[in-house]
Amino acid sequence: MKTKFFAAVVTAAALMGLGGCATMDRTTVGTVGGAVVGGLAGSAIGGTGATILGAGAGAYIGNQAAKRY
């Protein structure tokens, strides 16, 4: 339980840090944000493999969503 809480805190801090980067374009922010959210979701569902797959899928979805909007 402590590990998941710590991961959520680190994720929130990372997303806040990315929001402050004015030099990053929308596609990069979408890709990184999607990877973080996907990795966190994968970690909640399963082990290391699910975390890696979730991060990869999240990065792809975040990238494509940023390109469309």
Image (cartoon, rainbow, N blue to C red):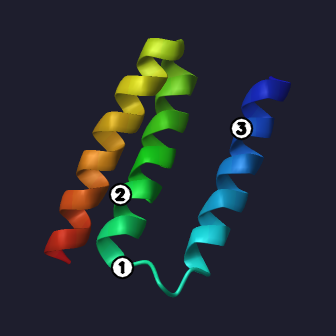
**Of the image marks 2 and 3, the number of the one nearer the N terminus:** 3
Residue flagged by tag 3: what amino acid is it? Ala
Give the class, few, some or many, for how many residues have Cα within 10 Å of label 2's Cα (few <14, many ≥20).
many
Q: In which quarter of the image is the C terminus?
A: bottom left
Q: SS for tag 3?
A: helix
Q: Is residue 5 above or below residue 28?
A: above
Is 2 situated left or right of 16 in this image? Answer: right
Question: Residue visible at 34% across and 77% down?
Answer: 26
Rendered location of residue 2, percent (x, y): 85, 27
Q: Is residue 8 above or below residue 49?
A: below
Measured in 3D between alpha carbons, the distance from the residue under mark 1 to the one under mark 3, in whole angstroms, is 25 Å
Mark number for residue 25? 1
Measured in 3D between alpha carbons, the distance from the residue under mark 2 to the one under mark 3, in whole angstroms, is 19 Å
Disc 1 and disc 3 in contact, CB within 8 angstroms? no
Name the residue that disc number 3 marks. 7
Question: Residue visible at 50% across and 20% down?
Answer: 45
- Which residue occupies the extreme front position in the image? 23
Q: SS for tag 2?
A: helix
